[in-house]
Image (cartoon, grey):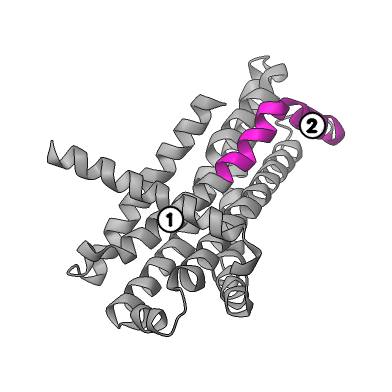
């Protein structure tokens, strides 16, 4: 019973952290020059440095899932279902989750490590004594950078995956669908729900990763944990949060 209550309490704390980040991010006074500099610094880490990994993952998914899907659906006479199957798999499920996991490894773990090191060395307390809110300076910009990175990378991931899968399938003769018709079919198959799910999932997943990693790093109960244990704990919590958020949004929309 205590474990259940502890888990529920931690989930409420993570939700409160995410809500606080969103609230403070919408306040213009939050974005003073140091906060803006921290945002762009972390954007370089989580967005630019992960760009190649996202493109490679998208190309591999397109090469395996999209091209094979086009081939087999066409062979079984289900060409009309190609758009629905691919869009459901890529836009609504695979794309945001894969990008979220890449952002967790390339940004969330970095956020966790930096914040935990600053807490252990007393830098956060030093900022607080100087009248600088560590949450506004060190947490909000970094979490928001992860949110923006997951959103932009999700769109890039889907475009690269679809382009790679169709190009390979068309070049090998696996599908005879013209390029223009394929693009039209994809855009039509996404539908209003798809255009809502993609930004909702990507933004929520990015916010979950940032909030969970920041909360894990700043949790006073984690002060006695080693770096490896803390990283593993944050990684497991963040993955669980990503899967939970993805499932809830899929069920809701």
Above or below — where is 209 with respect to 7?
below
Mark 2 Cα within 10 Å, few/some/many (few <14, many 20+)? some
Judged left or right of residue 42, residue 224 is: left
Judged left or right of residue 132, residue 88 is right
Name above or below for residue 32 compared with residue 163. below
- Given residues 179 and 20, the one toward you in this image is 20
Across and down, in percent, residue 119 comes to 32, 76
Instruction: Point out residue 120 in the picture as x, y percentages from the top left corner.
Output: 28, 78
Query: Magenta stretch: residue 191 in it?
Result: yes
Please state, as top left, top right, bottom left or bottom right, where the N terminus lies in the image: top left
Q: Is residue 101 visible?
A: no
Q: Any mark on residue 182, and which? A: 2
Could you tell me residue 38's position as x and y percent?
56, 75
Q: Residue at x 57, y 47 (%)?
A: 203
Calculate the distance from the C-alpha at mark 2 to the C-alpha at mark 1. Answer: 38 Å
Q: Earlier in the sequence, mark 2 or mark 1?
A: 2
- The residue carrying mark 1 is 211
Was residue 173 drawn as part of the magenta stretch in this picture? Answer: no
Q: Is residue 4 among the parts visible in the rendering?
A: yes
The front one of 11 and 153 is 11
Q: Which residues are magenta?
A: 179-202
Q: Residue at x 20, y 62 (%)?
A: 221
State whether the magenta stretch is mostly helix, strand or loop.
Answer: helix
Residue at the farthest left position: 1
Determine the secondary structure under disc 1: helix
């Amino acid at each position: 019973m205590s474990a259940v209550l502890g888990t529920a309490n931690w989930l409420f704390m993570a939700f409160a952290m995410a809500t606080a980040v969103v609230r403070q991010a919408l306040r213009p006074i939050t974005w003073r020059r140091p906060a803006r500099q921290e945002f762009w610094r972390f954007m370089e880490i989580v967005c630019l440095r992960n760009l190649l990994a996202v493109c490679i993952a998208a190309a591999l998914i397109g090469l395996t899932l999209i091209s094979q899907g086009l081939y087999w659906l066409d062979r079984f006479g289900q060409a009309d279902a190609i758009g629905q199957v691919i869009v459901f798999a890529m836009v609504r499920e695979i794309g945001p989750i894969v990008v979220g996991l890449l952002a967790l490894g390339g940004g969330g773990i970095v956020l966790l490590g930096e914040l935990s090191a600053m807490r252990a060395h007393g830098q956060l307390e030093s900022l607080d004594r100087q009248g600088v809110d560590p949450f506004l300076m060190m947490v909000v910009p970094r979490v928001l950078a992860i949110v923006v990175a997951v959103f932009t990378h999700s769109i890039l991931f889907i475009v690269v995956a679809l382009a790679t899968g169709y190009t390979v399938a068309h070049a090998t003769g696996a599908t005879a669908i013209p390029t223009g018709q394929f693009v039209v079919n994809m855009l039509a198959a996404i539908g209003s729900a798809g255009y809502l799910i993609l930004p909702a999932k990507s933004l929520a997943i990015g916010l979950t990763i940032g909030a969970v990693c920041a909360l894990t790093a700043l949790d006073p109960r984690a002060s006695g944990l080693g770096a490896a244990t803390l990283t593993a704990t944050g990684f497991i919590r963040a993955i669980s949060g990503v899967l939970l958020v993805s499932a809830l949004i899929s069920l809701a929309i």
